[in-house]
């Protein structure tokens, strides 16, 4: 028969003390582990949010840099729908100002040449069913600086031709929507004044009806845009927390900034950012000593509830 005193084991008190010591050690270890792990997770979320925001801003900036000069506009008081609107360039051309089939600005014209061969590029858009428009010397012309009051004949967003006297009555910087253009290739030609050699093959521009453009561009630049895809608006809906790109809607005198009303309500659109907490756009038109500048402010929420504010400044060519 065994002696009870020779048996070994844990008493209840010893077991409780062991559990107590283990819980104290676990609590102490969690203090050193949870903090760094939580910090790592938060840092990863911040880094992911910043990377997403930077990618979004780069894409928007690239889009804005492809705008027809002086076609950007931003509402002064956008409310819950901050937005920026512009017209993308399909092709930037140099028109012939003298000799041959040149573009005149003192009369209506129905055909003229641009230097270089753009026939393949522009014909491809027409074959796809796109309607092409043209703008020459687009102006930042708004009444009292209000972008919802573009001046007729001077600004692409106001389709009415000028009533005169300046610019000339019936003229406009942009070809009317009812006047379509077609393109073709012309043979090699020569300048008639002070030119002793051949120029590159030219592209002929033919208009549906004769039209007089308002101004001669100092750099002889004409910008072709795709009416099927223009204009374009980036709109933040702060109620829904989204940034959306809209395109292919009708030109409007008043800049659209509501996703639920025309022309944006029926436009093509794609959401480019979610979890948008704040958003704003500012636009400073170009002047003689600097280019035009767009500043984008975009606040994005991450999973831990904090908001990261990203700022992007975009310099744009403003010489039309």
Image (cartoon, helix red, strand yellow):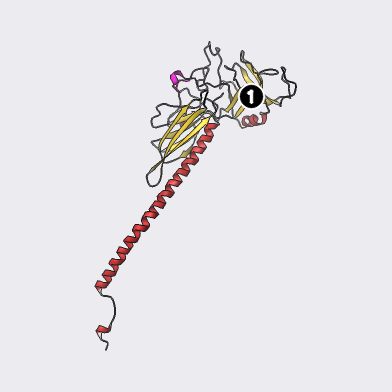
The residue closer to the viewer here, 256 or 47, is: 47
Quick check: 7 above or below 249? below
Q: Position of residue 241 (x, y in %)?
A: 41, 38
Residue 247 appears anywhere in the view: no
Q: Residue furthest bottom?
A: 1
Q: Residue furthest top?
A: 165
Quick check: 164 above or below 225? above
Span shown in magenta = 137-152
Residue 61 appears anywhere in the view: yes
The residue closer to the viewer here, 28 or 267, is: 28
- Disc 1 marks which residue? 94
Horizontal arrangement in the rendering, residue 60 relative to residue 238 (left or right): right
Residue at left offset 61%, top offset 29%: 91
Q: Residues within 10 Å of mark 1 (few under 14, many from 20)?
A: some
Regarding mark 1 in the picture, which secondary structure is present there? strand
Quick one: quadrant of the C terminus? top right
Q: Position of residue 197 (x, y in %)?
A: 75, 23
Quick one: quadrant of the N terminus? bottom left
What secondary structure do most residues of the magenta stretch adopt? Answer: loop
Residue at left offset 28%, top offset 66%: 20
**Magenta run includes residue 224:** no
Q: Position of residue 282 (x, y in %)?
A: 45, 29
Q: Position of residue 162 (x, y in %)?
A: 53, 14
**Magenta run includes residue 140:** yes
């Amino acid at each position: 028969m065994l002696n009870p005193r020779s048996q070994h084991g844990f008493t209840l008190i010893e077991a409780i003390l062991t559990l107590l010591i283990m819980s104290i050690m676990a609590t102490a270890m969690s203090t050193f582990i949870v903090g760094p792990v939580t910090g790592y997770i938060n840092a990863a979320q911040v880094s992911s949010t910043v990377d997403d925001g930077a990618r979004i801003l780069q894409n928007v900036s690239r889009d804005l840099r492809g705008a027809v000069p002086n076609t950007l506009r931003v509402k002064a008081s956008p409310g819950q729908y901050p937005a920026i609107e512009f017209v993308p360039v399909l092709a930037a051309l140099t028109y012939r100002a003298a000799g041959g089939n040149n573009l005149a600005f003192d009369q209506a014209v129905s055909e003229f040449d641009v230097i270089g061969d753009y026939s393949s590029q522009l014909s491809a858009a027409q074959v796809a069913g796109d309607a092409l428009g043209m703008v020459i010397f687009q102006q930042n012309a708004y009444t009292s600086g209000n972008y919802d009051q573009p001046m007729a004949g001077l600004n692409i967003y106001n389709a009415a031709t000028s009533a005169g006297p300046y610019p000339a009555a019936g003229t406009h910087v942009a070809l009317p929507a009812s006047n379509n253009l077609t393109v073709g290739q012309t043979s090699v030609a020569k300048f008639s004044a002070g030119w002793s050699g051949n120029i590159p093959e030219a592209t002929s521009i033919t208009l549906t009806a004769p039209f007089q453009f308002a101004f001669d561009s100092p750099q002889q630049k004409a910008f072709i845009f795709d009416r099927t895809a223009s204009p374009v608006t980036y709109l933040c809906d702060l109620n829904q927390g989204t940034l959306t790109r809209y395109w292919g809607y009708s030109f409007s005198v008043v800049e659209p900034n509501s996703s639920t009303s025309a022309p944006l309500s029926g436009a093509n659109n794609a959401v480019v950012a979610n979890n948008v907490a704040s958003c704003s756009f500012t636009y400073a038109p170009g002047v003689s000593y600097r280019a035009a500048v767009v500043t984008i402010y975009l606040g994005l929420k991450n999973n831990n509830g904090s908001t990261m504010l990203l700022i992007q400044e975009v310099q744009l060519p403003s010489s039309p």
